[in-house]
Amino acid sequence: MPLPLFNIPFPLTPPKAAGGEAERVDAALVVDTLRRGVVEFARMKRKDHYNVLAVCMLRDFAGREIFMGMLEEMSNRKNWHLDMAGPGRLFSERELANEDGEPFDGYILTMPGTDAVMKRLAVAKAPTVLVNITDKRLAARSESVSSVWTDNANIGRRAAKHLLDRGGYKSAGYVHELKPQFYSTERMIAFRAEMKRKGIKTEEFPEGDDFSDFQARLREWVRKLPKPAAVMAVSDMRAADVVNACRAEGIPVPTQVAVVGVDNDAAQHGTCGMSLSSVVLNMNMMGRQAVRELDFLFRHQKWHGRPHEILIPAKDVFAGESTARSVSATRLVNMAQDFIAANRAVKIAPADVARHLGCSRQLAELRFSQICGKTIRKAIEDARMEEAKRRLKGGAAANEIVKSMRFTSANQFYRIYKRHFGHTIRQVNA
């Protein structure tokens, strides 16, 4: 839309005087005139009140989070009025107008409308923000459209990093949606690239329309993966399917197959008998960003060089049971020994060691006893006694050691020392 002149003296090239010489033009006056013209133009375009239609699917957690983000961001815009289309279904043409029959000033769509609706929106040219959906007709508009997307490449990288931080693997796997989806492919490509950098090949479990043999095919697939394996699933629902397939094949999760999903959907935990590690999406931020994009379109109509698509990265990775114990037994014990050695001068307990390892105390004790032949408590005592002996030989007084190493009492220190070494403290430097 061209900028109205508002009495701006165009052209701005200096006019010719009677003598043929160019008259001087005050540059400050020109700049001030332009500024006032732009401000007046912006005021003309800014309305006192905006009616906005938001179309959200509130039946799932993600849809509710997006909608909550919208409401939080709109709370700062007192002149906006929000209407909701019927959740959980395609909205119709009659919902493109408000209760007074007037078209809305702007739209935020997290789910598509009917074909007729999308055609009308494409022609209407009202400011429109698409959230995780696309439409060729709207995308063809040269102005007043913005898209907010989940950053699927970021999701794939976050999942890979989470798995790689928890152990060494012989192979990796990726489980797609049942039907081909672009976001599944984008996540897989990023996940595979991260694994490849570590020299790990990723095997894909392909999409397929036939759900009747899905579980049988998935069981065969996980059985053939070289173990230990790191598996990412496109969603928590598919991640739960992987865990159940492993259980059916007698494959322990996560010691032999570590699994991470996407969405952090607590409802899926009950379907597989354990908490799932999952990439947490920032849906609240997507809702907030959608409102910001619409606000920009209301004020500017075009992007003037700003990106047409906004990518929202993942918020976090929830570490559940499906990956918490995925490190190898040897590495787990090495990590425990390093932690004990680093804290030998302070008072720690087996529970502190397990917490550092990110696994249950039962698993930590089991792996430690299998490899070291003693309990974690005994390993802590051994390390502390060796440190105490080193200090005694260095000339430190027993009372100083009791205080600095946080023994309960001097008597406790003397008793443990004699039991451990078979001689008293007095005999150290004798």
Image (cartoon, rainbow, N blue to C red):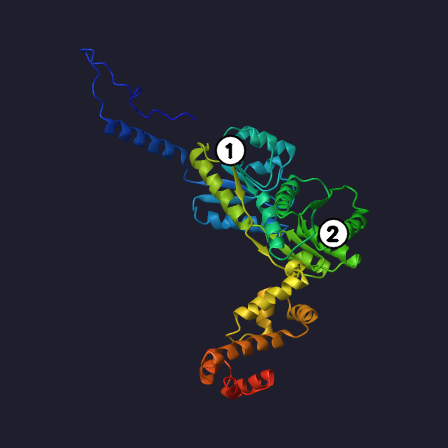
Residue 66 drawn at (x, y percent): 56, 48
Quadrant of the rendering where the N terminus is positioned: top left
Mark 2 vs 1: CB contact within 8 A: no
Q: Is residue 178 left or right of residue 23?
A: right
Q: Is residue 130 above or below residue 426?
A: above
Looking at this view, name the residue that lies furthest to the top. 19
Q: Disc 2 vs disc 1: which is toward the camera? A: 2
What residue would you read off at disc 2?
226
Residue 75 drawn at (x, y percent): 46, 49
**Which residue is painted at 50% across and 74% down in the image?**
345
Measured Cα–Cα span from mark 2 to mark 1: 54 Å
Mark 2 is on which residue type? Pro
Q: SS at mark 2?
A: loop
Looking at this view, name the residue that lies furthest to the left. 19
Residue 59 drawn at (x, y percent): 64, 50
Residue 382 drawn at (x, y percent): 59, 77
Residue 355 seen by the camera: no
Q: Residues within 10 Å of mark 2 (few under 14, many from 20)?
A: some
Q: SS at mark 1?
A: loop
Q: Which mark is residue 126?
A: 1
| Mark 2 or mark 1, earlier in chain | 1
Mark 1 is on which residue type? Ala
**Which residue is painted at 75% across and 50% down in the image?**
225
Residue 286 seen by the camera: yes
Q: Residues within 10 Å of mark 1 (few under 14, many from 20)?
A: some
Residue 85 placement: quadrant: top right
**Which residue is painted at 31% across and 20% down in the image?**
10
